[in-house]
Amino acid sequence: MMSPILKVEGLTVYQGNYLAVRDVSFELTPGTDTAVVGPNGAGKSTLVKATLDLIPRRAGNIEIFGRPLARLGNLRHLIGYMPQNFIFDRSFPISVKELVGLGWVATGRNKYSFFSKLQSQRQEKSLAVAEALRRTDAYQLRNQAIGTLSGGQLKRVLLAYCLVIPRKLLVLDEAFAGVDMQGAADFYALLHELKQEEGWTVLQVSHDIDMVSRHCDRVLCLNQTVVCTGQPEIALSPQNLLATYGPGFSRYQHHH
């Protein structure tokens, strides 16, 4: 049996005095795509942020790649993260290729002199950025300022940022927020293709029940604590959705 990429045990998180996530446990098997679904205020974003140690937790143990969070070290480079809201000053003069380049980390494989090593790293970085942008259908945007991008274009560029070096775990927090229905469908198709090619393990927060049922391997239904978890056909049954969302759960579904 393969060791889990991510293992969460007894995770409890407070936001001030509010209990946002209570005693949550789950595992991610290598190569799977797991969606976290639930109503607004259920603790979905809090869960993924605490899992990555972006916000403090009150209790719980978290291991990624078989190591406790505190001892991940350079293995953090193997994690790609797309936040729900990428907030930035739209007047800031940074181009698409410069932003994607920020995700590149030198491999240190070149053992030659300092100057030849530096030149080699610059070339390697430039090639990696160009390839990541091509694979996310964003190469034509490479010289644009990021402040000029549409919501869908920005999502593709952020995916290129995650793709510019090899990753093992990709965490998406409501990655399709602010993207129209067709844009979200296109992005899901691209994500699925890249996941197959790269062997990513994916953890994503989503409101789109239909997309989740078609593309994800497992679903975790959350409403402060885990209501149910399992394959989509089981976790997304009418009974489980009712238990997760309450009587009005149907309004959270998108119909394509």
Image (spheres, grey):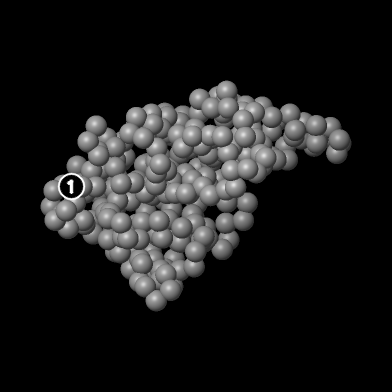
Disc 1: which residue: 250
Q: Is residue 145 left or right of residue 35?
A: right
Marks counted in the figure total: 1
**In which quarter of the view is residue 182 placed?**
top left
Of residues 2 and 168, the one nearer the viewer is 168
Question: In the image shown, does 99 or 195 lie closer to the viewer?
Answer: 99
Q: Position of residue 28 (x, y in %)?
A: 38, 49
Kindly indicate the quadrant of the structure image that contains residue 212: top left
Whether residue 25 is visible to the viewer of this picture, yes or no, is no
Which residue is rendered at x = 44% and y = 66% of the image?
Answer: 61
- Please indicate whether residue 116 sits to the left or right of residue 165 in the image: right
* Image x and y of residue 103, in percent: 62, 42
Q: Is residue 80 above or below residue 63?
A: above
Residue 118: image location, x then y, percent:
80, 36
The residue at the far bottom in this view is 17
As displayed, is residue 1 above or below residue 115? Answer: below
Q: Tell me the quarter of the image containing the C terminus.
A: top left
Q: Position of residue 7 (x, y in %)?
A: 41, 57
Q: Residues within 10 Å of mark 1 (few under 14, many from 20)?
A: few
32 and 190: which one is in front? 190
Whether residue 114 sits left or right of residue 149 in the image: it is right
Residue at left 65%, top 44%? 92
What residue type is disc 1 on? Ser
Q: Secondary structure at mark 1?
A: helix
Q: Name the residue at 74% across, 34% down.
A: 121
Q: Residue at x 21, y 57 (%)?
A: 244
